Image (cartoon, helix red, strand yellow):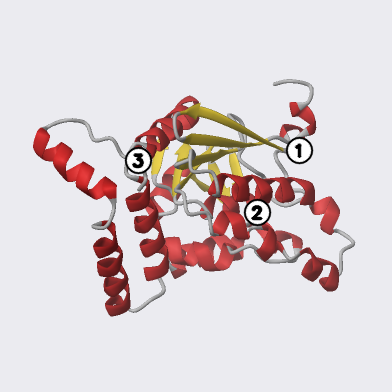
């Protein structure tokens, strides 16, 4: 890390071909989600979404902590209009709308806004020492960046209510059992495993990957009939791509396919 990096709240690296690693960089305050950090994160995802060389994104807070929630200092004296004018829905929109798969690599705390940030991702890989919580109720507020809505969709009403109403954390193993976490690995393996998975996804045909993500997310709140129609249409569309022809021919030729994203 260079001296210039220490002044930046979000760092971007390329650990493997087609993979971007986005790292929160406020370790001195457990990666508290300040307004500046959120703005930099928003810009980073807007940029990566438009970059054809990036096929998968890993989001992490580093080896010690993911993010321990919002910046309470900035909220202490804020009024409702102040919070409204922050328009967090707009700030977080580039993450929510990112067409590329996002893997959250979670070590340590993912509390409050940190848990909500992880839930914006498509896959969550957590270290055995990681923990997740929505502790907002303990300071007189509630989640405001999707914590009530994404959590209940991920783990169901009863697990979600327990976390939301008590504010108590759950371990990585509990989170995995509940359906909040995709995979639990040793703490030191979290980022390497996330990068390895991202590299594998990046080697897949990008148009198919993007269509899978789009249809899964769009179909979650649709009726089954509508969701199945979206699936059929997306599958039909992929038969117009070069990568579909390349993938099937490579399978028949027993060789590795060369996917070009067209």
Q: Earlier in the sequence, mark 1 or mark 2?
A: 1
Residue where numbered disc 1 is placed: 29
Direction from residue 195 to residue 250 in the image, left or right: left
Q: Nearer the viewer, residue 133 or 192?
A: 192
Q: Is 31 situated above or below 150? A: above
Assess whether mark 3 and mark 1 are in contact (beta carbons under 8 angstroms).
Answer: no
> Which residue appears farthest toward the top when viewing the image?
2
Q: Residue at x 42, y 43 (%)?
A: 173
Residue where numbered disc 3 is placed: 260
Q: Nearer the viewer, residue 67 or 220?
A: 220
Q: Is 103 situated above or below 85? A: above
Q: Nearer the viewer, residue 163 or 155?
A: 155
Quadrant location of residue 21? top right
Distance of label 1 from label 3 (alpha carbons): 42 Å
The secondary structure type at the circle numbered 2 is helix
How far from the left and from the top, in percent, is residue 41? 67, 47
Residue where numbered disc 2 is placed: 113
How far from the left and from the top, in percent, is residue 88? 70, 62
Q: Earlier in the sequence, mark 1 or mark 3?
A: 1
Distance of label 2 from label 3 (alpha carbons): 36 Å
Mark 3 Cα within 10 Å, few/some/many (few <14, many 20+)? some
How far from the left and from the top, in percent, is residue 73? 85, 51
């Amino acid at each position: 890390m260079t001296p210039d990096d220490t002044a930046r709240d979000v760092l971007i690296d390329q650990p493997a071909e087609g993979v971007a690693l986005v790292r929160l960089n406020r370790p001195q305050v457990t990666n508290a989600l300040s307004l500046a950090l959120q703005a930099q994160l928003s810009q980073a995802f807007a940029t990566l979404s438009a970059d054809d060389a990036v096929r998968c994104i890993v989001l992490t807070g580093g080896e010690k902590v993911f993010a321990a929630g919002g910046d309470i200092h900035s909220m202490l004296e804020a009024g409702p209009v102040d919070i409204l004018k922050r328009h967090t829905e707009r700030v977080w929109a580039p993450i929510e709308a990112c067409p590329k798969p996002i893997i959250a690599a979670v070590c340590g705390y993912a509390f409050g806004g940190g848990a909500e940030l992880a839930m914006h991702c498509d896959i969550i890989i957590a270290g055995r020492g990681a923990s997740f919580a929505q502790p907002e109720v303990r300071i007189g507020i509630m989640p405001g960046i999707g914590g009530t809505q994404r959590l209940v969709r991920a783990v169901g009403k009863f697990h979600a209510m327990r976390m939301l109403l008590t504010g108590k954390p759950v371990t990585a193993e509990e989170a995995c059992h509940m359906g909040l976490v995709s995979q639990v690995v040793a703490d030191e393996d979290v980022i390497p495993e996330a990068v390895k998975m991202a590299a594998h996804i990046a080697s897949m045909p990008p148009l198919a990957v993007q269509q899978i993500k789009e249809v899964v997310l769009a179909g979650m709140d649709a009726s089954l009939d509508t969701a199945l129609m979206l699936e059929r249409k997306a599958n039909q569309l992929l038969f117009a791509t070069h990568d579909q022809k390349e993938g099937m021919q490579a399978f028949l030729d027993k060789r590795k396919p060369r996917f070009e994203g067209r």
